[in-house]
Amino acid sequence: MTLHDATAFAASLAATLMVSIVVFQAGDGSFGALPAEEIEGDEVAVMFEIDPFA
C-alpha cells in the first residue's frame, strides 16, 4: 500500500471506528494502518497517528 492509500484508509478507519489509527512503514518499505493498540513497534516504523478526537 502506498503512503497516500494508507493515510486515506487510516482516516476512514479513525472516523468509522472512533479509535486512534497508526500509519506505519513495514520492513519491506510498504505502508499500512492499524488501530494504535495493535501496533507492536519492533518490526514497524510509526509514521504518524490519526486521532478522531483531536
Image: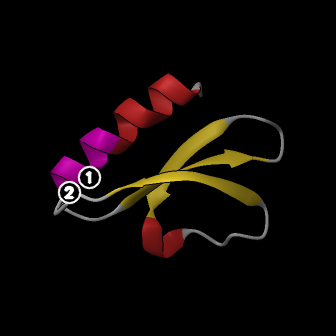
Tag 2 secondary structure: loop
- Residue 31 location (% of width, % of height): 62, 38
Above/below status of 49 relative to 5: below
- Residue 30 location (% of width, % of height): 70, 34
Which residue is at a point 36% across and 31% down the rendered structure image? 8
Q: Amino acid at mark 1?
A: Ala
Q: Quadrant of residue 32?
A: top right
Above/below status of 5 relative to 34: above
Query: Which mark lies nearer to you, 1 or 2?
Result: 2
Q: Amino acid at mark 2?
A: Pro
Q: Main secondary structure of the magenta part?
A: helix
Near-viewer residue (52 or 32): 52
Give the residue pinned by disc 1: 14
The type of colouring in the image is secondary structure
Separation of disc 1 and disc 2 at Cα? 6 Å
- Residue 36 location (% of width, % of height): 45, 68
Is 13 a magenta residue?
yes
Numbered range of the magenta stretch: 11-16
Answer with left or right where residue 29 lies relative to residue 37: right
Q: Is tag 1's residue or tag 2's residue first in the polypeptide sequence? A: 1
Is 12 a magenta residue?
yes
Tag 1 secondary structure: helix
Which residue is at a point 29% across and 48% down the rendered structure image? 13
Which residue is at a point 78% across and 35% down the rendered structure image? 29
Label 1 packing within 10 angstroms: few (<14), some (14-19), many (20+): many
Give the residue pinned by disc 2: 52
Q: Quadrant of the image for the C terminus?
A: bottom left
Q: Quadrant of the image for the N terminus?
A: top right
